[in-house]
Amino acid sequence: MSSTFDTVADIISDIGDVEREKITPDSHVISDLEIDSLDFLDVAFSIDKEFDIKVPVEDWMTEINDGNADAEEYFLMKNLCAKIDELKSEKAA
Amino acid sequence: MRLEYFEMIDRVESIDLDAGKISVHAYVPKDSTVFEGHFPGYPLVPGVLLIEAMAQAAGYLILANEKFERMTFLAAVKEAKLRTFVLPETALIVTSEIEHDGAGYTMSKAAITADGKKICNAKLTHRTLPFENDDLKGHVLERARVTGLLNEG
């Protein structure tokens, strides 16, 4: 989790031009770090490349827009990193 | 090309889904209402329409990659360079290559040449979404047949 967090925080800091120190496990990617849906495609691209996974951006957005999930579930940094770790584990399995 | 209808691609020359590459032909017509305004007395293909042509070539590639089950929408254009003016009656070759096939989005590179000369290039991001309705899907499939993207039977 910690290495995933550091990597994702670096990516978001770079793409969103956010000060690295401001990014914590409890930061909300959208509301706190001001990464919009278009920026998040670039974030997902970098995460995909870095971890050799496919972040299911569209599925997540659909779940949120349909009211089947809270945005925090995917876009709180600690939750996002946990999802990434799950995807990494599924890929490795 | 029928610029007024945003029909930018005339014919698919080649497509390789394994390599993630496409090459298409696009011939700029002699006359178009677009040229009445861009520009009076000096007709040039607007740069935004060259970007649209690249976006459509990439979109065709993604459509085929998605087996025509999902529609593609241009989401971002990066590092677009418009290098040369394009006049009426110019034969263009539009190419695109997938850089990353994500889940719900695709990153690609695209370029246009004429007589081997670089016209423009850009990096593109497309979102892929389910077709909004059957009318749209039918129209897309018809264009895919007309241009040779979709070969049935």
Image (cartoon, rainbow, N blue to C red):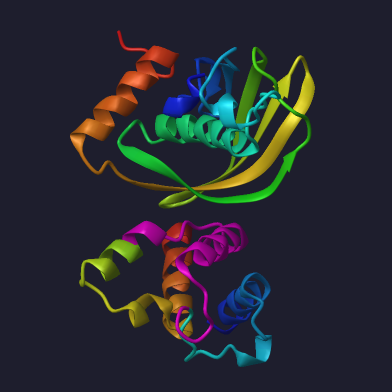
Q: Is residue A51 magenta?
A: yes
- Closer-to-camera residue (A26/B149): B149
Q: Residue visible at 62% across and 62% down?
A: A50
Q: Is residue B62 left or right of residue B117?
A: left
B35 relative to A84, above or below: above
B39 relative to B132, above or below: above
A14 relative to B114, above or below: below
Q: Residue visible at 34% across and 64% down?
A: A61
Q: Is residue A30 left or right of residue A70?
A: right
Q: Residue furthest top?
A: B153
Q: Residue visible at 43% across and 33% down?
A: B65
Q: How many numbered marks are there?
A: 0
Q: Which region is colored magenta?
A: A30-59
Say which quarter of the image contains residue B45. top right
- Closer-to-camera residue (B115/B71): B115
**What is the x, y in percent for residue B21?**
58, 28
**What is the x, y in percent for residue B82?**
73, 38
Q: Main secondary structure of the magenta part?
A: helix
Q: Residue visible at 65% across and 30% down?
A: B39
**What is the x, y in percent for residue A35?**
52, 74
Q: Residue furthest front?
A: B41
Q: Is residue A76 left or right of residue B98?
A: left
> Is residue A40 at least partly visible in the picture?
yes
- Closer-to-camera residue (B82/B126): B82
Where the C terminus of chain A falls, by quadrant? bottom left
**What is the x, y in percent for residue B46?**
63, 34
> Is residue B19 at least partly visible in the picture?
no
Say which quarter of the image contains residue B20. top right
Q: Is residue B53 magenta?
A: no
